[in-house]
Image (spheres, helix red, strand yellow):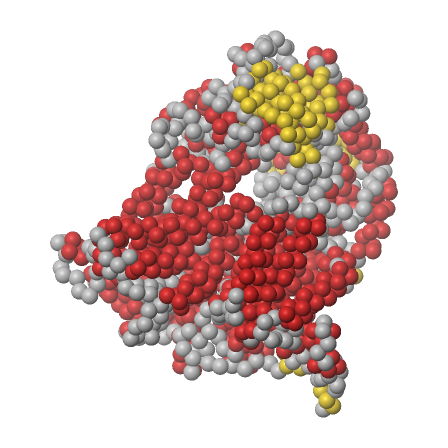
Amino acid sequence: MSRLRAIRRVMGPPVGAVLLALIVASVILFVSGANPFVAFGNVIEYGTRLETLVESFNRATPLYLSGIAFAIAMRMNLFQIGVEGQYILAAFVAAYVGAGVGSLFPPLHVLIILVVAMLVGAAWAGLAGWMKVTRNVHEVISTIMLNAIAVGGVVSFLLGRWSIETASLDTRLGDIATTGWFPSLNPILELVTREIKRVELTGFILVAAVVGIGYHLLVNRTRLGFDLRATGTNPFAAEASGVPPKRTIVLAMLISGAVAGLVGMADLLGDQHFYSLRFPQGLGFAGIAVALLGRNHAVGAAIAAIAFGWLERASGILEVRGDAPREIVTIMVGVIILFAVIAYALAQRRGRIEAAAAAAAQVTEASGPDTEEADT
Amino acid sequence: MSIVREPPMITLRDTVMQGRRRWLVYSLGAVLILAATQMFAKQATDDLTSSGTWAIALAWSVPILMAGLGGLFSERAGVVNIGLEGMLILGTWFGAFGTMIGGPWFGMLLAAVAGGVGGLMMATAAVGFNVDHIVAGVAINLMAPGLTRFLSDLHFSDRGGSITQSPNISGVSSFSLPIFAGGTVFGWKSPDILGSIENAEVFWLSDLAGIARGFVFQMSWLTLIAFLILPLSIVLLWRTRFGLRLRSCGEHPHAADSLGVNVYKYKYYGVVISGALAGLGGGFLAIQLSGLYKEGQTQGKGYIGLATMIFGNWNPIGTARGAILFGFTETLRLRDESAAHALLLLVAIVVGLLLIWRILRRSGRLGTVQLAIVAVAVGYWYANSTGVPNQLPAITPHIAVLVVLLFATSRLRPPAADGLPFRKGDT
Amino acid sequence: MTVAVHLEGITKRFPGVVANDRVNLTVESGEIHAICGENGAGKSTLMKIIYGMQPPDEGRIEIFEEERHFSSPKEAIDAGIGMVHQHFMLADNLTVLENVILGAEPSKGSLIDFATARTRLRELGDAYGLDLDLNDTVETLEVGERQRIEIIKILYRGARILILDEPTAVLVPQEVEELFRNMRELKAEGHTIIFIDHKLDEVLEIADTITVLRHGRSVATVDPADVTAQDLAELMVGSELPTPGARVLTVTDQSVIEVRDISATDEVGAPRLRHVDFSLHSGEIVGIAGVEGNGQAELVEAILGIAPLTSGSIHMHGEDVTEWSVRQRREAGLGYIPEDRHRRGLLLPAPVWENSILGHQTRKPFYRSGLWIDEQASRDHAESVVGRFDVRTPGVTTPIHALSGGNQQKLIVGREMATRCNPLIAAHPTRGIDVGSQAAIWEELRRARGEGLGVLLISADLEELIGLSDTLLVMLRGEIVARLDPAEVSPRELGAYMTGVAA
């Protein structure tokens, strides 16, 4: 009984938010002259094709990493809006180093690129952490400013300096040698499916899974995670309990930034193999949506990332068939997030009231009505 | 006995009256520094103090000012509004769209309404449902660009625009103040007193005249209105019943509630006004400054406005000061490369002066060393270069925000209940 | 004589509890009417109902012999009722003037008429001895002044009925006298005053009529001339009154904390602690008395290691710990019962078991070697604390915010005791909890002292301090101004030291 209720409480808000977003999208489709049923039918038909599914997972991989990067800091009540700047800067520097070292023993080459990316991401996030602990600069402001400085300043400036001449108009860095490529999972996947055309399932999905498991264990099972969560729920109590607040803030930002550094790696190592002006942007902000919908939970964020990745890929058909601009998906994502956070707030409040009632009932049973409501 | 800290109390008298004389001294000093920088600059420029620069700077400060004042209304009511950026974006799109169908004035109206609706959504989540304010704001910021992109595809693609931008639109007309800046009155071309002084090229005096003229020369009516919103906001917040009640909701909502003030109502008002102002800022950016809607054109001005308000210490005058500063750097980027280079010298001089002041005040080693390093580094850079990368002016506001916050946060005082959830009856 | 307030059969339920159970109350116009009852008896809820902050589930309210149904404080204010809350409802960053006129601003057009407001306030201020710059922000004022502003605030609104919720809780004896003088003046002018208090001597001194609440019911309305403090106490508790009790000397010569001449400043450099010097021994309870804000909180933070010292040193078990982090000190056995359990003591949304190891998460058995928290050991520990200290909770996975204040406090006390810490800093260990739990905590402290625990006790409850301590130190403006023998000092004398009247 209570298990059922718990499931409903966890799953209710996101499912409800998705349904509401579907309704909103239907209305928009209807108003803009398309038949919502036909349009969604097309999306589902296209979205269940093997190639679309592979693309969805490819898209979900960086989204998930970005969501986890945000979630790590969020568990400490740090609003790390800076994943965007961290992953772009990290991908840029890693691409430069990765191309610069030439050919190496493959695992080593990949490892170097990953380590560089994580270090750069950590350093850029650590800067915001340092500003917070030394000068009490709120991380929302500092990370937003650091995003602009990283993307509009550092990357833009250095890309201009380090770019190579190519036939195309694109401003880009040099290629990473094949020893620095991450293998595709297509051969393994094809053991159970038919042959996959045109697209390759990124092997980086395994890295994302490892990061997810690591995140779950770190936060819920370790002492550092306990300190982190304690600081997130009540920094004053955490401090009195012996958690060094400054060190923990910086540490959380460093870990978060390191994971953020991995966000661009799926595309860099698995797909593009060089950094250019056309390198995917906006993954950092999309990751916030993933973390919010997934409630900073390792599995929740995975579901959210896959859902958003699928929506984005599968919606491409809308434009092809002329039903509607695919940007309807960005509206849906926004609506899902807005409704989901509202629904979570409501569910949390109801949970609190129920728990208080249960505790009060316990007291009443034991001793009569002499203990009043929880103190104010 | 309690040991009382100096409270940075903000009353109307403080913000407007008391600071007047000090302001005059500061302003004259600032112009002196600008004039001196210009005189010593390696590459000749008069753009640091020309009326042309300042007229444009003023216009470019409007979006940031509007976002900042928007943040002020919201945060004074106790709601942290990180969603300003999204509301600004809504303003740019609807401003452009409104201008296309009904002219610039209608565009501004539509921009304000769109921003206000964004504010209403934010308020519904953050105030009505007690969603964490930053989460609610981020949700708005995620949603707004998606919405505008979708709408662009529907309405701009087939009218000479594209999925990322609108067709060109035109803004409202400008005016110059008669007598001071040579405006015309009933067809009579009045003299241009400030202009004459500016052209006389007398050190400092001409610079003063140039900057002053910038405030009255070829100013669009929309800029004028935007700057009138500033004193209006001050009066509204500090002189009226509405303002007192709104501020009380940001300081101690339960106290306000216990006196019969409808806290929810004022918080909603605060956030909706906030959104409408941000929407105006967005509309101004699209209609008056850019002449079109273009994706990404806000370039984080909502966040910068918010930051401006924070280091303006939740105070309208301070917010305006920051907004003008950012309008100025933005203008130099657009106008003149040698002026942008002179900016390096300016930074070196200002930091140097700050350093001297700190040493005279004996205010601790912390910070002084860093300042010295910054002054020397920037000075060295200036001396060994002839230009700056074009990225630098673009990110100057962001660096400035960080630097100011790094050095000033200890003196900042947000409203006491800023960002806290409120639920009637929970004390 | 008319009846100012008449309540009949007021019932108010909260999830799982009945806060007010068919309460009847009659307050004559122009009297001072005290409402007594122990914590959790439903006094505050009843006052909030009269003031329109919470609607009753059942019952009838008459104000000046007219039935009323208030749906907000605004309506109560319009009906001539004003309330001073226990936690002051003043915005620190607004001026005195703004705080007073908020919600009832005189206006000219759409602007506030500050001149009229000023004149009215000056009149009220003259009448009630409030001599303040109306442009000062409230944050610069002291507790007594704030309370007077609260009273002015409701008089400004034309209140004829004043509700004061535990007005004396935050005052020292001398300030209480001043408050009582003001109350008598107000009464002489025809105001009706309802006030909540559970200090019986005060109630007997000032009240014209006393109504006692117990377990949410009104059990008696009496004339103070007819009852003794003992009678009242029995009405309130329904059984024997607990006292801190007799003292057995268990002090040893083994020092657990030595505070050697420490000084500290706040972040802007103003001195908060000046040359504080004392030692605490195994088996000893040292009580710190003082008006709040005189350095007690800073002393606690200094010993915990949260706030840095400007000079002096702190030793624990003979070792110099001045440079140690909070965590090192806690691992060395320092226990802490915080003054504000919600702020410093608990992770409110977290389950009971996590809260039961908070502060000890780096110690065995909760922390296994390597990286990991041992959840099973922690839960077992939580179960044993819950059992031994009678924490009423549905289980150890229940979030702690669901528990009542008393049970939360018992969990904190239990957590420090069960982990066998020594020394223990106990700041207001029984604040805001019911009498039964209070007695249990006192008993627990005394028992542990017998086993060699050294306790630094900070409290505002003078009876508690005098009853439990072996040594009493009085703090004033960051200094220790007196060392007293609790056996030979009365609460009144102690109050004189605390305010600097005696030296």
Quick check: C38 above or below B195? above
Q: Nearer the viewer, residue B230 or A352?
A: B230
**Would you say residue C239 is visible in this rendering?**
no
Quadrant of the image for the C terminus of chain B? Answer: top right
| Quadrant hosting residue C190 | top right
Quick check: C109 above or below B250? below
| Quadrant hosting residue C250 | top right
- Horizontal side of C14 relative to C311 (left or right) equals left
Q: Residue at x 54, y 16 (%)?
A: C453
Q: Nearer the viewer, residue C407 or A97?
A: A97
Q: Nearer the viewer, residue C275 or B137?
A: C275
Q: Residue at x 40, y 24 (%)?
A: C364
- Horizontal side of A133 relative to B22 (left or right) equals left
Quick check: C256 above or below B220? above
Of all residues, the one furthest to the bottom in this rendering is B187
Quadrant of the image for the N terminus of chain B? Answer: top right
- Horizontal side of B231 relative to B305 (left or right) equals right
Residue C211: image location, x then y, percent:
70, 27
Q: Nearer the viewer, residue B185 or B21?
A: B21
Residue A184: image location, x then y, percent:
21, 57
Q: Residue at x 62, y 36 (%)?
A: C45
Q: Residue at x 49, y 81 (%)?
A: B168
**Would you say residue C253 is visible in this rendering?**
yes
Residue C142: image location, x then y, percent:
74, 37
Of all residues, the one furthest to the front in this rendering is B384
